[in-house]
């Protein structure tokens, strides 16, 4: 291990007696030395490589070559006054809006002309994301799916839905492995469930320590990517998208600021 790598790891290492749920001492000994940071993201359009990186979204995505990513799946932080590991989101809604505009601008840059982006959004910010995406992309649909928030403190209607904004860089994109505008085969025409933007059939539960069901991301990958396509998750959390990409033959790049979440994501992908 190089001296620079040792310095970076020592600066982010955990107390070995204070493990995160889902991680044991053996996991820390295995995965801590394997952590890569933003300094390790040195890519060109001719030399791309997969990886899960300890990095802020903007720092990481700025190191990705232009027109190199086929699909972006993003679940931005929603509680701007909560327990965020850095202060790049700011402290006001205006700063939050400006921060979102910055990373979405970078997302537009790295996306291929045939590429697509899916942005997860609670109902409170759905209008904001629609406006931001409309300025940079071609918004194709608002998907509504069944998401139950166990910590919902609503005093009236309980919130059981969330939005996913689906947009493309240009109008020359593929959907279900067909150019949009061409007649699809009879099988796709009859498969109304997969092509509906109301995804109420997805299970409530989560899989293997993640945040969302794997079927959610499998549906997105199936609709907007091919095998060996490059998929970017700027806020990867516990590695749900990374895990789905590995199981479905996509190449993955992800960023996460919480080292415990990153380590758990590394373990989940390694064990899959």
Image (spheres, rainbow, N blue to C red):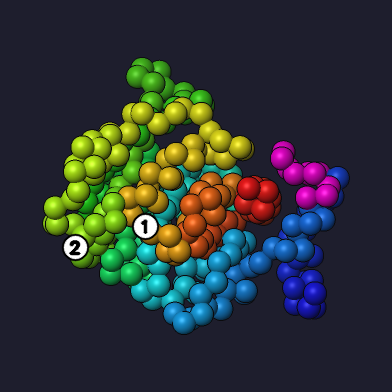
Residue corresponding to mark 2: 171
Residue 36 screen position, x and y as percent: 66, 67
Vertical side of 238 occupied by 21: above or below: above
Cα separation, mark 1 vs mark 2, equals 16 Å
Residue drawn at x 52%, y 68% is 59
Choose between 100 and 120: the one closer to the eye.
120
Image quarter in which the N terminus is found: bottom right
Give the vertical position of 39 relative to 176 (above or below).
below
Q: Which residue is mark 1?
A: 225
Do tag 1 and tag 2 residues touch (Cβ < 8 Å)? no
| Point 24% across, 42% down: residue | 187
* Residue 77 location (% of width, % of height): 48, 48
Furthest-top residue in this view = 156
User: Residue at (20%, 65%) from the top-left corner?
Assistant: 172
Q: Is residue 98 visible?
A: no
Q: Nearer the viewer, residue 199 or 184?
A: 184
Is 100 colored magenta in this rendering?
no
């Amino acid at each position: 291990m190089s001296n620079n790598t040792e310095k970076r790891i020592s600066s982010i290492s955990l107390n070995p007696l204070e493990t995160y749920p889902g991680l044991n001492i053996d996991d820390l000994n295995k995965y801590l030395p394997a952590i890569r940071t933003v300094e390790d993201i040195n890519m060109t359009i001719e030399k791309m490589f997969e990886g899960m990186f300890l990095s802020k979204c903007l720092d990481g995505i700025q190191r990705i070559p232009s027109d190199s990513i086929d699909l972006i799946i993003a679940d931005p932080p929603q509680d701007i006054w909560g327990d965020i590991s850095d202060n790049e989101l700011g402290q006001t809604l205006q700063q939050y809006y400006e921060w979102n505009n910055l990373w979405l601008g970078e997302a537009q840059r790295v996306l291929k002309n045939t590429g697509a982006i899916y942005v997860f959004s609670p109902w409170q910010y759905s209008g904001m994301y629609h406006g931001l995406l409309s300025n940079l992309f071609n918004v194709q649909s608002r998907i509504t799916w069944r998401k139950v928030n166990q910590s919902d403190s609503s005093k009236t209607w309980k919130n059981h839905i969330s939005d996913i904004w689906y947009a493309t860089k240009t109008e020359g994109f593929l959907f279900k492995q067909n150019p949009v505008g061409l007649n699809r085969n009879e099988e796709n025409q009859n498969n109304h469930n997969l092509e509906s933007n109301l995804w109420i059939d997805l299970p409530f539960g989560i899989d293997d320590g993640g945040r969302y069901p794997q079927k959610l991301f499998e549906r997105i990958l199936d609709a907007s990517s091919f095998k060996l396509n490059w998929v970017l998750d700027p806020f990867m959390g516990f590695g749900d998208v990374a895990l789905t990409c590995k199981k479905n033959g996509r190449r993955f790049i992800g960023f996460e600021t919480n080292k415990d979440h990153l380590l758990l994501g590394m373990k989940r992908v390694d064990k899959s």
